[in-house]
Amino acid sequence: MTAFSILDLCPIVEGGTVSEALADTRLMAKRAEDTGYTRFWLAEHHGMKGIASAATSLVIAEAGHATSTIRIGSGGVMLPNHAPLVIAEQFGTLEALFPGRVDLGLGRAPGTDMATARALRRNLDSGANSFPDDIIELQHWLGDPDDGKLIAIPGAGSHVPLWILGSSIYSAHLAAALGLPYAFASHFAPDMLLDALDIYRAQFTPSAQLSSPYVMAAVMGVMADTDAEAAFLFTTLQQSFVNMRRNARGKMPRPVDSMEGFWTDVEKIAVEHTLRYAVVGGPETARTRMRDFITETGADEIMISMPIHSSQARLRSVELFGEMRAAL
């Protein structure tokens, strides 16, 4: 049975606050655990009015305190923003708090605009280029301590499992070379999905962490009791992507009855292309969409992001995807 997991951005919705966003994430993590999901991950983003997961390890800890069995982690930490030692200490602490439940997904994008990246004290000249070396350094800090003077405490000996996140064939080559599990961001970058998965599987080299390829593919997901209700809720995400194209980012917008009159024909084509793997609908429609996606990708696990304005509708979507997994 294909595993289902959740990617949460701790969304700050129109009419809502950061405190409410954090409370909703705790509720969502608990509902995911109760409904049989494998993981609950949070993503690092900075300087975005609609996302409250900038201090990613802290929000992961909140999800951990709200649950007891589901795996928790990052989808992902943008490693070029940080010294590997600092991330080892943070995730070593999480592993000590929640033993055997923590994942560390790693990306090489800044997770923000360039001005914010500079404010993060990121080395813009070498950050992305040093990504493979930073991963190897991070593995060192999380591995068994040696006789050197430097040590990550907490972190050393924790062996927190690493994942490579990506949206291009570069990440596929890297994950294969390092022998790490691979998560592809097809929920917003669908174009290279199948090529990247083929490269990863063909070139995979076994490692101490993983003996054979393991693929996670991501989708945007909005489920409701009817197709019409799901389509209505999905307009929140459609508006958000149009707003990003217009460089008018804000809090997560309320859904609208129709997108006509909101987006131009060009914007509609672009957004529908970007979101072409989205699984949206009532139980029957969504199940067919998800089955087709699993068949096309052969993914071992599906990561679902649920950008829904209403907290209650979001929790209902979590339940319905959980029921779908059992049906599949």
Image: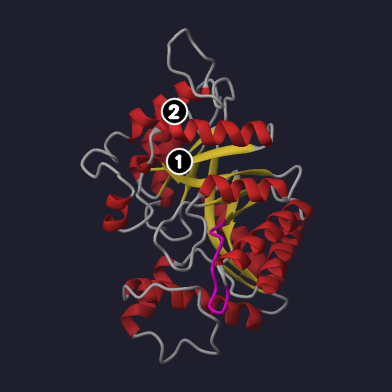
Disc 1 marks which amino acid? Leu
Tell which of 240 and 122 is nearer to you: 122
In this rendering, would 29 be left or right of 80?
right
Element assignment for label 2: helix
Residue 185 is tagged as: none
The residues bearing labels 1 and 2 have C-alpha atoms spaced at a distance of 11 Å
Residue 38: where, in percent of width, then height?
68, 46
Residue 58: where, in percent of width, then height?
57, 47
Q: Residues within 10 Å of mark 2 (few under 14, many from 20)?
A: many
Q: Nearer the viewer, mark 1 or mark 2?
A: 2
The residue located at (50%, 24%) in the rendering is: 152
Residue 19: where, in percent of width, then height?
60, 65
Most common SS among magenta residues: loop
Residue 193: tell me if it is visible.
yes
| Residue that numbered label 1 is attached to | 106
Q: How many marks?
A: 2
Residue 3: tell me if it is visible.
no
In this rendering, would 309 be left or right of 26?
left
The residue located at (52%, 50%) in the rendering is: 217
Q: Is residue 56 positioned above or below 219 on the image?
A: above
Element assignment for label 1: strand
Let me know if residue 10 is in the magenta part. Answer: yes
Residue 138 is tagged as: 2
Let me know if residue 113 is in the magenta part. Answer: no
For residue 316, which quarter of the picture? bottom right
The range drawn in magenta is 8-16
The residue located at (76%, 58%) in the rendering is: 327
Tell which of 78 and 197 is nearer to you: 78
Tell which of 208 and 137 is nearer to you: 137
